[in-house]
Amino acid sequence: MDIKAYMQQVGIQARAASAAIAKADSGLKNKALQAIANAIQDSRDSLISANQKDMQRGAKNGLDAALLDRLELTPARIDNMLEGLQQVIALADPVGGMTDLEYRPSGIQVGKMRVPLGVIGIIYESRPNVTIEAASLCLKSGNAAILRGGSEAIESNQALALCLRAGLEAAGLSEHTVQVVETTDRAAVGELITMDDFVDVIIPRGGKSLIERVSREASITVIKHLDGICHVFIDDDADMSKAVNVSINAKTHRYGTCNTMETLLVAQSVAEKVLPELARAFGELNVELRGCAKTKAVLADVKDATDEDWVTEYLAPILAIKVVDDMNAAIKHINLYGSHHTDAIITENYTRAREFLRQVDSSSVVVNASTRFADGFEYGLGAEIGISTDKIHARGPVGLDGLTSQKWIVLGDGHIRN
């Protein structure tokens, strides 16, 4: 395959499709989403079968447990795909919405209108469910999409691509509205991230090396996050039952996700009370603990934590623990070592909770709940196209609004400027 020629053709088709989907009304877009859901429901067996081929090849090629977990497409995850589609259907269509309209002294009316970004390129690894999440959000927000999944999920993604095409055609929309790249050649990524004429935004979802490469080489705007170094801080005034339950969930609900806790911070005044109970619970779940000197004074059996542990996204049953003087020390640690993704405080002190919310510089800041909630589905976005730790345009889970922009609109009636 001539990769450059192939990707250029994909780009040309996407640009043409974007003009049509940008002006499609909500009813037509929802019809397409429902038809895609119907196609997935009808194809459950073939989707599982295709995914099993990927899983078997992945195991043979030595994919680690975290990547295999991301790759697996279970009946429950197909159910989640279908539920996500229904949520996106139910969401208000942001396209065409006008806000901030006000009259100026000249008599003109000035405001903003929400519009699609155009063509969005998404590059992702392992998770086949991203194919449907990305497609549904791009479609509902009036964007065309070029999806380049990882080679480890090629069978699953091509099976899902058949469902996407069937749904789009059933609604009378171009099959090129959402295109799943058919080649596993890494050169396709290099082409996609430099196709300025056809692609408006690139969103990478995957490991740090992928995102660093895309950020370094792309000539197109990138919405991204590099790491998910998430923290839970147990405050002096924490409810210890909540602290234990939230900490266990934040770390062990799933190890291979970007919103999993990687560092636990504990106020010194409660360390002797809560750390032994946490150590027992984590020990039962075979989580390796690495602690600072103050942690080891309470838990003698934990391994020594190094400076490298504070900046490591394990994606594995390993947890770094640091005992800190107080909330201010916790905030300082989070802002210094964290990745600005998701950080939580466990406290019954309303004033401290408010200060934590205000001072922690992350895309999601949580009070008395697990970091695992930092997810578009859980936030009511229906699905997410990724998490952004950037501070311009979109931040946190990126849903429909994050896939649109705003343009200024001016309403007049023959007005001229004097």
Image (cartoon, rainbow, N blue to C red):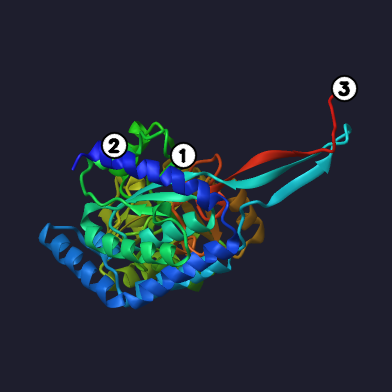
Res 190 label = 2
Alpha-carbon span between mark 1 and mark 2: 15 Å
Is residue 82 left or right of 112 when viewed as pictured?
A: left
Name the N-terminal-most of marks 1 and 2: 2
Residue 365 visible at all? yes
Residue beneath the point at 88% across and 36% down? 107
Alpha-carbon span between mark 1 and mark 3: 37 Å
The local secondary structure at tag 1 comes to loop
User: Which of the pair 334/361 is nearer the observer?
Assistant: 361
Residue that mark 3 sits on: 418
Res 200 label = 1
* Residue 12, above or below 401: above
In this rendering, which labeled residue sits more in front, label 1 or label 3?
A: 3
Say which quarter of the image contains residue 381: bottom right
Q: Mark 1: which amino acid?
A: Asp
- Quadrant of image for the N terminus: top left
Tell whether label 3 touches label 2 (CB within 8 Å). Answer: no
Q: Position of residue 283 (x, y in %)?
A: 28, 69
Is residue 287 left or right of 145 when viewed as pictured?
A: left
